[in-house]
Image: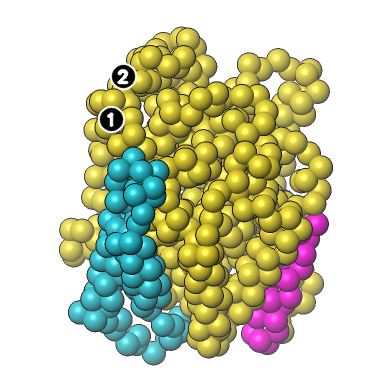
């Protein structure tokens, strides 16, 4: 079967999540940083998710799925 | 799980909802995109056996990483301390590796499409029908429980009415499974794996900062009611004077062998992920690749449980907001700012939906191949069975909604259903393992060992409920129930084989050890791939070794 690659889905969704959460993290109020025990958790997690998303897309780019040989398996 | 309103309500804002909405849209998008690739029933039910091993491996672990599991393991972490690690390192990893190394050659090599189908070919139709029906029933009930639990937690955290969560959750799962079949389920499970980690990691990090790092956590746990015992895994297991109330024999044989091998190796909702892999080697690596994240998941479940124990005043109440089951939701409320809070909520919702989708995709396959095609309408064209699969999906979810409302009538049904169905797996594992390695085991021996084994565990379970038999805990009951089921099934298999004819050897090729052409010989089981990091035996050995090594610092 010819199916799209799951890395594109993970990649794009985490890029979007990463951008949203990083942007929040940049503008986090002191109260929000206070709630997270002084950790800029939105900023760090946003960047981490962005990295995961870009990493997935890069992996897909460098190592695209091989076109499947014509299915000889069972079609039962 | 008791989640009262108000006290647990999260302070979510528009961005958190945006994150949740993006997830819903993505999941549905996967369903629509996967639909275009479906040309045959094998595509719908087994993803055309085309998936790479890392995808099926993450889906394998994700199908088990339901929200009930996450919330439950954090609760156990708070209640029993580090002994909860046994559920991962001895209760899961060895069985996952065993499935990949020893059992997968039989499953994948025989080209069966489901676990019941293996039983039909190894034994006979009555064995098959019994297992197919009990599996189908169990999956619908568990799907309902997942749905109900999702609704309960959304009511507590977001204030959504129960019926609204049930309808939304069911509708989304319905749409993406009906459209995209198993491919949708698997892709969304992989996605969910990352989302749930993205939600739990910040919780753990901020929590650890709050308690002063690992050393701070250790000191605070020592000062807590749980005390030093909460920081050890094996040290007090000569007797039952430890938080879990189980000795090492119970832990190794009850949890590590009978319960966990029963669950991981015969549960079709899990095995199906491996059957969708693109070749034998990928199928065998599926559970083994899943074992590596499984080793580390307790860092984001058990550790937050301990953090909750020492930071949340009054955790461990018998009812109300501060029951152990609320450890994770309470930490989310206390520690996460908007943004990562939305990711964490999305992770929980995602894991409920993925858990339910695993049940539904297992159900529709068994219903279509094992019940409809085998007993009702044979020899129709392939498109007929895709259609039946889609209708079965809808039917299964509608019944699931019904059982969700039934579940709403019971206060503690989650524990009981989990215990009940883990017991169905113990006799199944016994029947399987004897049948796979003893070619003389007869067809009727399969049927009677499965039936009487199940009845043995059911008797103990019902006796436990009615207080006829006294057990210290549900856990102890499930150990004895599984043990009784296992022993009964093995004895019955031996006795019945004495009195009934064995199957001719040529009908058992590929299904029994030593009789296969090539797929199940000892050489195949040991042999791997040219590349060392694709060798199932080596990878499995590394996973088990890591499980042993990880115990050392928390002995």
The image shows residue B251, relative to residue A62, as above or below, that is: above
Q: Which chain is cyan?
A: A
**Badge 2 vs badge 1, beta-carbon distance below 8 Å:** yes
The quadrant the C terminus of chain B occupies is top left
Residue nearest the observer in this picture, A7 or B540: A7
User: Are there few (<14), some (14-19), or many (20+) residues within 10 Å of tag 2?
Assistant: some
Residue A20 placement, left or right of B124: left
Furthest-front residue in this view: A30
Q: Is residue B281 magenta?
A: no
| Residue B490 position within the rendered picture, expressed as x and y whole percent measured from the top left | 59, 34
Q: Does the image show residue B118?
A: no
Question: Which numbered dot is residue B212?
Answer: 1
| Residue B185 position within the rendered picture, expressed as x and y whole percent measured from the top left | 53, 68
Question: Which numbered dot is residue B429?
Answer: none
Q: Which residue is mark 2?
A: B219
Q: Secondary structure at mark 1?
A: loop
At x 45% / y 74%, what residue is drawn?
B49
Using the numbered discs, state the Cα–Cα distance from disc 2 to disc 1 in whole angstroms. Answer: 10 Å
Mark 2 belongs to chain = B
Residue nearest the observer in this picture, B72 or B290: B72
Q: Is residue B385 magenta?
A: yes
Residue B149 placement, left or right of A58: right
- Magenta region, residue range: B381-402
Residue nearest the observer in this picture, A13 or B250: A13
How many marks do you count on the picture?
Answer: 2
Mark 1 belongs to chain = B
Q: Main secondary structure of the magenta part?
A: helix
Q: Colour of chain B?
A: yellow
The quadrant the N terminus of chain B occupies is top right
The quadrant in which residue B323 appears is: top right
Residue B330 placement, left or right of B416: left
């Amino acid at each position: 079967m010819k199916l799209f690659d799951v890395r594109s889905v993970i990649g794009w969704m985490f890029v979007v999540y990463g951008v949203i959460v990083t942007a929040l993290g940049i503008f986090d109020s002191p109260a929000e940083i206070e709630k997270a025990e002084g950790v800029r958790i939105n900023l760090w997690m946003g960047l981490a998710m962005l990295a995961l998303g870009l990493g997935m897309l890069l992996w897909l780019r460098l190592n695209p799925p091989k076109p499947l040989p014509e299915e000889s398996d069972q079609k039962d | 799980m008791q989640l009262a309103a108000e006290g647990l309500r999260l302070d979510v804002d528009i961005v958190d909802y945006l994150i949740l909405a993006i997830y819903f849209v993505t999941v549905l998008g996967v369903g629509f995109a996967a639909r275009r690739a479906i040309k045959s029933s094998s595509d719908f039910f087994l993803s055309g056996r085309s998936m790479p091993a890392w995808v099926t491996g993450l889906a394998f672990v994700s199908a088990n990483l339901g929200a009930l599991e996450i919330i439950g393991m954090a609760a156990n972490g708070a209640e029993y301390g580090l002994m909860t690690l046994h559920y991962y390192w001895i209760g899961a990893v060895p069985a996952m590796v065993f499935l990949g190394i020893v059992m997968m050659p039989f499953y994948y090599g025989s080209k069966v499409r489901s676990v019941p189908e293996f039983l039909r070919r190894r034994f006979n139709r009555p064995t098959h029908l019994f297992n197919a029906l009990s599996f189908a029933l169990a999956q619908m009930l568990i799907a309902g429980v997942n749905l109900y639990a999702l609704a309960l937690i959304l009511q507590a955290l977001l204030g959504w009415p129960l019926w609204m969560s049930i309808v939304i959750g069911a509708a989304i799962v319905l749409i993406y499974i009906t459209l995209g079949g198993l491919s949708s389920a698997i892709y969304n499970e992989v996605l969910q794996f990352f989302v749930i980690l993205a939600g739990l990691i910040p919780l753990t990090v901020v929590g650890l900062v709050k308690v002063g790092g690992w050393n701070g956590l250790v000191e605070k746990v020592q000062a807590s009611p749980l005390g030093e015992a909460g920081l050890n895994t094996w040290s007090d297991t000569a007797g039952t004077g430890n938080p879990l109330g189980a000795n090492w024999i119970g832990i190794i044989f009850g949890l590590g062998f009978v319960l966990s091998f029963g669950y991981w190796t015969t549960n079709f909702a899990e095995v199906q992920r491996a059957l969708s892999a693109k070749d034998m080697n990928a199928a065998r690596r599926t559970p083994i690749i899943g074992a590596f994240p499984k080793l580390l998941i307790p860092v984001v479940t058990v550790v937050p449980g301990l953090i909750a124990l020492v930071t949340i005043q009054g955790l461990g109440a018998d009812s109300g907001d501060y029951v152990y089951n609320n450890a994770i939701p309470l930490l989310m409320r206390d520690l996460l700012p908007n943004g990562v809070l939305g990711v964490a909520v999305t992770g929980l919702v995602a894991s409920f939906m993925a858990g339910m989708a695993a049940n539904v995709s297992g159900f529709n396959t068994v219903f279509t191949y094992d019940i409809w095609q085998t007993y009702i309408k044979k020899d129709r064209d392939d498109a007929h069975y895709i259609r039946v699969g889609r209708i079965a999906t809808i039917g299964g979810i509608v019944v699931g909604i019904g059982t969700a409302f039934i579940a709403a009538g019971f206060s503690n049904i989650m524990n009981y259903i989990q215990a009940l169905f883990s017991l169905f797996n113990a006799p199944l594992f016994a029947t399987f393992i004897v049948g796979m390695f003893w070619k003389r085991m007869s067809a009727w021996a399969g049927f009677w060992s499965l039936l009487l084994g199940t009845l043995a565990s059911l008797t103990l379970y019902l006796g436990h409920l009615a207080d006829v038999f006294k057990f210290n805990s549900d856990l102890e009951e499930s150990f004895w129930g599984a043990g009784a089921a296992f022993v009964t099934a093995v004895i019955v298999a031996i006795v019945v084989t004495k009195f009934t004819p064995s199957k001719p050897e040529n009908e058992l090729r590929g299904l029994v050890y030593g009789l296969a052409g090539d797929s199940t010989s000892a050489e195949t089981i040991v042999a791997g791939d040219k590349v060392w990091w694709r060798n199932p035996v080596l990878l499995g050995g590394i996973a088990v070794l890591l499980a042993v090594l990880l115990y050392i610092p928390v002995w």
